[in-house]
Image (cartoon, rainbow, N blue to C red):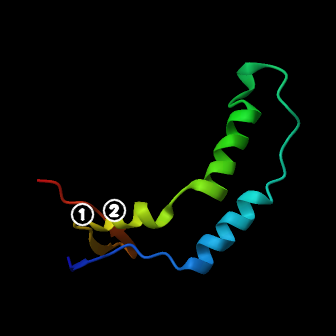
Amino acid sequence: MDIRPFTISVPEEQLVDLRRRITATRWPDREVDPTQGVQLDVIQALARYWATDYDWRAFEARFAAWEQPQTLSAELRATFRSLR
């Protein structure tokens, strides 16, 4: 098994596209019963946070501070964390 180092790095254009798609979400009608799942206002607030306030680069820096080896197994790339 070949294990290689990996560092997360998401291109800015992908983050811009993600924010655009979150902002363009077509929302369903408001739920009529709380058993229908997450309340619409809660999920809309979360989407607004992800689209406008979430600091992806800060997360990337925190995540990159940990060792993140990567391997190929059964044609699938697997990134894992080695905690000791």
Going by the picture, which residue comes out furthest to the right? 29
Q: Tell me what residue is drawn at x 26 percent, y 68 percent.
A: 68
Work out whether 39 lies above or below 22: above
Q: Nearer the viewer, residue 75 or 64?
A: 64
CA–CA distance in space, label 1 to label 2: 6 Å
Instruction: Tell me the number on the disc at residue 52.
Output: none
Is 30 on the left or on the right of 80, as rendered?
right
Where is residue 33? Give x, y as percent.
79, 19
Where is residue 3? Give x, y as percent.
21, 77
Where is residue 26? Give x, y as percent.
84, 52
Query: Three-letter amino acid code at disc 1?
Result: Trp
Work out whether 78 lies above or below 83: below
Instruction: Tell me the number on the disc at residue 66.
Output: 1
Q: Tell me what residue is drawn at x 39 percent, y 76 percent.
A: 75
Is 16 on the left or on the right of 84, as rendered?
right
Q: Tell me what residue is drawn at x 73 percent, y 64 percent.
A: 21
Is 17 on the left or on the right of 55, as rendered?
right
Work out whether 17 lies above or below 27: below
Q: How many numbered markers are drawn? A: 2
Q: Are marks 1 and 2 in contact (CB under 8 Å)?
A: yes
Q: Quadrant of residue 40?
A: top right
Q: Quadrant of residue 69?
A: bottom left
Q: Nearer the viewer, residue 44 or 52?
A: 52
Where is residue 5? Give x, y as percent.
24, 78
Q: Quadrant of the N terminus?
A: bottom left
Query: Three-letter amino acid code at disc 2?
Result: Phe
Q: Which residue is mark 2?
A: 63
Going by the picture, which residue comes out furthest to the front? 53
Is 33 on the left or on the right of 17, as rendered?
right
Q: Quick one: label 2, few (<14), some, or many (20+) residues within 10 Å? A: few
Q: Tell me what residue is drawn at x 55 percent, y 56 percent.
A: 54
